[in-house]
Amino acid sequence: EDQVTQSPEALRLQEGESSSLNCSYTVSGLRGLFWYRQDPGKGPEFLFTLYSAGEEKEKERLKATLTKKESFLHITAPKPEDSATYLCAVQPLKTSYDKVIFGPGTSLSVIP
Amino acid sequence: DVKVTQSSRYLVKRTGEKVFLECVQDMDHENMFWYRQDPGLGLRLIYFSYDVKMKEKGDIPEGYSVSREKKERFSLILESASTNQTSMYLCASSLRATNEKLFFGSGTQLSVL
C-alpha cells in the first residue's frame, strides 16, 4: 500500500537553530515528491517538486533533498515567519489519475 | 497568480441537512480536487474531476457527491450531513499533466451538529 509518513509530528526551534524535517514514503514507483507549506487557517502552498534520488531544490532558508526512500526538508537559520505546518506528498507511478498521497505534516514553531 | 476560491470559510449545519460546498478557480485548470483535512490524518482525497462532467472517486467518497457543470466550478455535496463529516474541506486545482503542483483554496471549516 502506498504510504507517506512524516517526522517529527511537531518541532520547536529557537530562531537561528537549523534542523531537518523527514518524509518517508512507500510507493510502487515514484513520479514525484512535493513539499507544501500550510499556515494556520489557509490552504497548503507549493514549495518544491523532486523527481529522482539525489535531486536537491532550494528556496531561501529551505532546501529539499530526495533519496529512494525519503526526503528531507532542511531549514537553515530559521526565522519566526518560517513557523507553519510542512506537508510532504508523493505521486505514485501507477495511478489512474493525477493522484497525490499526503503525509500528516510536521508543525514547526520558531521561537524568537 | 492562480486563485482558488471557496464560497464559505466557516459553516455550521445540522445532522441530516444537505450541504453544498462551492469552489471556483480562475486559471483554466483541467483538474479539480476535493480533500478533507483532519488532525493526524493528513489530507485525504474525496473526489477528483479532470474535465467538465467527469468525476473520479478518491479514497473516501462515501457520503459525498460532486458536480462539475463548468470548467471553473467544482461543487462538493453532502447529501445528508453527519457528525463524522465535521472537518476542514480543501478544494484544489491543477493543470492536467503529471507532477503538476496543486493550488489550494483557503478551506471551509464545516461543523455538523
Image (spheres, coloured by chain):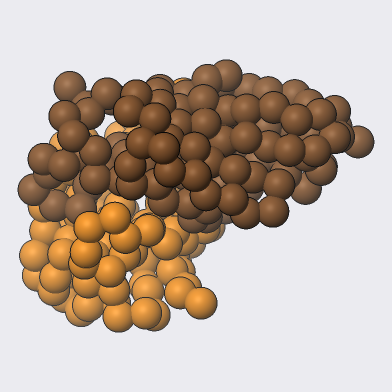
Chain colours: A brown, B orange
Q: In which image quadrant can residue A52 be found?
A: top left
Along the line of sight, the residue nearer the viewer: B3 or A77: A77
Is residue B48 in sight in this rendering? yes
**Vertical placement of residue A29 versus B1, above or below:** above
Q: Residue at x 27, y 23 (%)?
A: A26
- Left or right of B101? Residue B54 is left
Q: Residue at x 31, y 65 (%)?
A: B94
Q: Residue at x 11, y 40 (%)?
A: A94
Q: In which image quadrant can residue A12 be found?
A: top right
Q: Residue at x 36, y 36 (%)?
A: A53
**Vertical placement of residue A70 versus A97, above or below:** above
Residue A93: x percent and y percent?
Answer: 16, 42
Is residue B111 in sight in this rendering? no
- Left or right of A65? Residue A77 is right
Q: Residue furthest right?
A: A112
Residue A27: x percent and y percent?
Answer: 22, 28
Q: Quadrant of the C terminus of chain B?
A: top left
Q: How many marks?
A: 0
Residue A73: x percent and y percent?
Answer: 56, 35
Along the line of sight, the residue nearer the viewer: A58 or B88: A58
**Vertical placement of residue B6 versus B110, above or below:** below
Along the line of sight, the residue nearer the viewer: B86 or B93: B93
Residue A61: x percent and y percent?
Answer: 71, 47
Q: Residue furthest front?
A: A54
- Left or right of B41? Residue A93 is left
Along the line of sight, the residue nearer the viewer: A69 or A92: A69
